[in-house]
Image (spheres, rainbow, N blue to C red):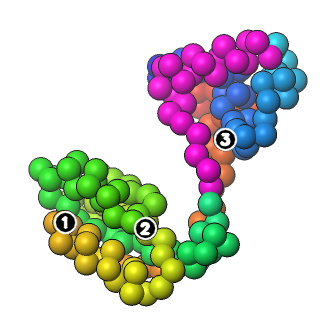
């Protein structure tokens, strides 16, 4: 399924799920979208089946959870080894997110949560020993997420 095959109902459902998938029931979404709760459930199942919805994730405030250090490692990985390196990165305790970028350098961003600097240093060594070239380490303060404007009501194939 491509973005152009999403209709207004699909977009509205995706918007509601992005806002709060845990607390929006099919019945609540159906009121917003003006279709039955059964239709919402079928649409969600179809979007999951087609791979548009790939999962549901919990957003964690790591500082509140006892991991006050959130560090972004900006790395370079050889293209031939990148896929393997990305998979193996999740073997390290503390790695919470890995992003692959389509650039020659700084092509991998690894987000790590930890309790102390020595823990972050240990993870940095593991990342380096695995085969990444660590180019930068950035201590993050906050991260913000927002539902995509692509799924706003009335936005279609702009």
Magenta stretch in the rendered image: 37-59
Q: Is residue 147 visible to us here?
A: yes
Q: Is residue 70 left or right of residue 155?
A: left
Q: Mark 2 or mark 1: name the one nearer the start of the chain.
A: 2
Q: Residue at x 50, y 33 (%)?
A: 54
Q: Is residue 132 left or right of residue 56?
A: left
Residue 45 lies in the magenta-colored region: yes
Q: Is residue 132 left or right of residue 40?
A: left
Q: Residue lying at the far bottom in this picture: please name it.
A: 117
Dot 1: few (<14), some (14–19), or many (≥20) neighbours within 10 Å?
A: some
Q: Which residue is mark 3?
A: 18
Q: Residue at x 35, y 56 (%)?
A: 90
**C-alpha separation, residue under disc 2 versus residue under disc 3:** 25 Å
Q: Which residue is mark 1?
A: 130
Dot 2: few (<14), some (14–19), or many (≥20) neighbours within 10 Å?
A: some
Q: Which quadrant of the rendered structure holds the C terminus?
A: top right
Q: Which residue is mark 2?
A: 94
Residue 118 horizontal/vertical position (percent): 39, 87
């Amino acid at each position: 399924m491509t973005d152009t095959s999403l209709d207004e109902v699909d977009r509205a459902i995706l918007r509601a799920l992005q806002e709060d998938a845990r607390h929006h029931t099919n019945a609540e979404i159906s009121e917003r979208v003006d279709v039955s709760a059964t239709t919402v459930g079928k649409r969600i199942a179809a979007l999951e089946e087609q791979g548009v919805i790939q999962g549901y994730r919990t957003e964690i405030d790591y500082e509140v959870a006892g991991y006050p250090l959130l560090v972004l490692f900006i790395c370079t990985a050889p293209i031939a080894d990148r896929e393997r390196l990305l998979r193996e990165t999740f073997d390290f305790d503390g790695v919470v997110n890995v992003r692959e970028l389509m650039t020659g350098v700084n092509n991998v961003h690894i987000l790590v949560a930890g309790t102390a600097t020595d823990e972050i240093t240990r993870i940095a060594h593991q990342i380096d020993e695995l085969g990444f070239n660590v180019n930068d380490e950035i201590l993050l303060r906050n991260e913000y997420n927002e539902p995509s404007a692509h799924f706003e009501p009335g936005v279609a194939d702009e």
